[in-house]
Amino acid sequence: MLLVHEFDSPEERSGPKMRHTQCMFNSAREMSMDESELIEIVKTRIGAATDADAERAIEAVLTTLGERMPAVDVQVVAAELPPRFARAMQLRSHDPGMSLEEFYARVSRRAGLSHGFAREHVQAVCRALYALLDPRAQPCIDVWPELVRPSLADRWPPVVPTHGRTLATGRPGSRHPLSEAKPAKG
């Protein structure tokens, strides 16, 4: 059952730029999000080599989201999450005035990432969460639309080279680079 509380005035809201409703629904329902699916989606979207990298990104984003969101919304989203990620979301105190740039900076510090990578990780985690959350809980994490708005990259899976060679291995493009070419005989 979804309950929506409409605020009569800005003073009743929990902070600046917060929407005029908060979502709540029966917290007795079971968690619906699969932990391994969330990790795999985030791992793919951020290009992580290991599950631990994806888990670190998820925990940093959820901890910071938990700071920004009203307590009632945190409870709704946490009820949907796997237990260890729900705990990460409920760790910090509430900071409703946090700007988007401060959000990125906190995730950057928590995950040990550069600011640019933190932005990418935040968007990847928020979009994965939004896609996996119950539709009734989705408005709870819609703190900043640009974090959950789908991008073109969400429509197509990443292109993975089939021959296993990348710039990192020093042999980009072809199995037979021009630098190793031999003149044709004949």
Image: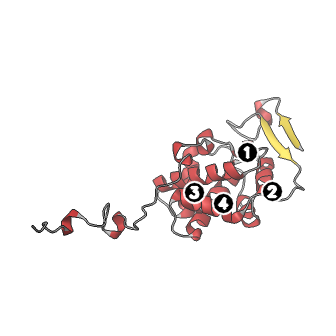
Badge 2: residue crowd in 10 Å (few <14, some 14–19, many ≥20): many
Rendering coords of residue 126 (x, y %): 63, 50
Of circles 4 and 3, which is in front? 4
Percent x, y for residue 129? 67, 52
Of marks 2 and 1, which one's residue comes earlier in the chain? 2
Q: Which residue is mark 2?
A: 79
Find the distance from the CA under tag 4 to the CA under tag 2: 15 Å
Helix, strand or loop at disc 1? helix
Q: Is residue 8 left or right of residue 17?
A: right
Work out whether residue 99 can be spotted.
no
Give how far across and how far down residue 18 sits, in percent.
71, 37
Between marks 2 and 3 in the image, the one whose residue lies nearer the viewer: 2
Q: Which residue is mark 1?
A: 138
Label 4: element kind: helix
Residue marked by disc 3: 107
Mark 3: amino acid: Val
For the residues bearing labels 4 and 1, Cβ distance under 8 angstroms: no
Q: Are marks 2 and 1 in contact (CB under 8 Å)?
A: no
State the residue at coordinates (77%, 48%).
73
Q: Does residue 81 appear anywhere in the picture?
A: yes
Which residue carries the number 4 mark? 38
